[in-house]
Image (spheres, grey):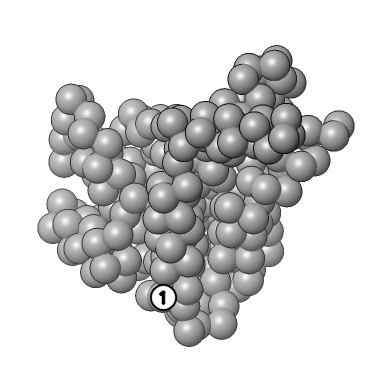
Amino acid sequence: LRQEALLRRARMAIDDSMYPDELLEAWGRQEAWTLCSSASTSFSEWGPPSVRHAVVEVANRVADDLRLPPDGVEQLMVIMDTYCRRRVTPQTLGMIPAAIVAICNILHKASSSMVAVTPRQLLRAADRCRVELHEVGVCSSQALTTKSLLAQEMDVLQALDWQVRVPTTRLWLTAFCARLDAATQGVLRTSIDWTLEQAVAFTATAMQSASALDAPPRRVAVGLLCHYLVA
């Protein structure tokens, strides 16, 4: 009876947390829809690892320039992986610089940031992407303009059916850790905080080699949580 009472109390604490079952179920459906695709390859598979590494590095700098939220780069790469799987081919890799900037701008708008991004900032970011990715063989055929960036943004939105709020590994980890902390009434908070810190740091490295299509955020979060809780 005592064990049942403890389980009921833990369940009530989880339900009262910021991350109830219904929210996680909604994230799961969103992730499943976002990552589903009939295509068979992604841009990570078309060239050496240096291509994805360069894309992540450029995305980090652009996200920083445009002041995206903490998990902005993770969101960007999940969307980028999905968009490339649905739209980009080995012959159209030149779309990637514009796609990075377009996705950053979409995420910036979705974040309800009070800091506006100007067309000049977007063009400067696009030029940086184009130059840096050219060094690893991603060649954009023409200079980008405000009009072409807007067209790219619309293409990304259509490819994602306007579903741009994608659950990231960091978001899953935050939810799992908050639920575990609630269920244990804070007894393991120090260990849980350490686990979250270590797991989030690992995701920054993992993005450079693993596509979200091959390693879905929820699955990665579960694996990292289990790994660091027993480390």
Residue furthest toward the right? 231
Q: Nearer the viewer, residue 131 or 160?
A: 160
Q: Quadrant of residue 47?
A: bottom right
The residue located at (15%, 52%) in the rendering is: 146
- Residue 46, placed above or below residue 209: below
**Looking at the image, residue 30 lies above or below residue 76:** below
Question: Measured from the top left, where is residue 12 in percent x and y?
Answer: 51, 33
Query: Which type of secondary structure does the marked residue at label 1 adopt?
Result: helix
Q: Is residue 230 left or right of residue 204?
A: right
Seen from this angle, which residue lies furthest left?
147
Amino acid beneath label 1? Arg
Image-quadrant location for residue 48: bottom right
Whether residue 141 sits left or right of residue 133 in the image: it is left
Between 212 and 183, the residue placed more toward the observer is 183
Query: In terms of depth relative to the viewer, which is nearer, 139 or 206?
Result: 206
The answer to whether any part of residue 113 appears in the image is yes
Task: Answer left or right for 155 relative to 32.
Answer: left
Residue at image coords 16%, 41%: 119
Q: Position of residue 86 (x, y in %)?
A: 41, 75
Compared across the picture, whether 126 is left or right of 213 comes to: left
Image spot of residue 45 (x, y percent): 63, 71
10 Å crowding of disc 1: few (<14), some (14-19), many (20+): many
The residue where tag 1 is placed is 86
Quick one: quadrant of the C terminus? Answer: top right
Quadrant for residue 176, please give it. Answer: top right
Question: Where 99 falls versus 24 (above or below)?
Answer: below
- Which one is in front, 142 or 172? 172
Q: Residue at x 60, y 73 (%)?
A: 46
Q: Quadrant of the N terminus?
A: top right
As drawn, 47 above or below 221: below
Please say whether residue 57 is visible from this viewpoint: no
Residue at (21% x, 34% y) in the render:
112
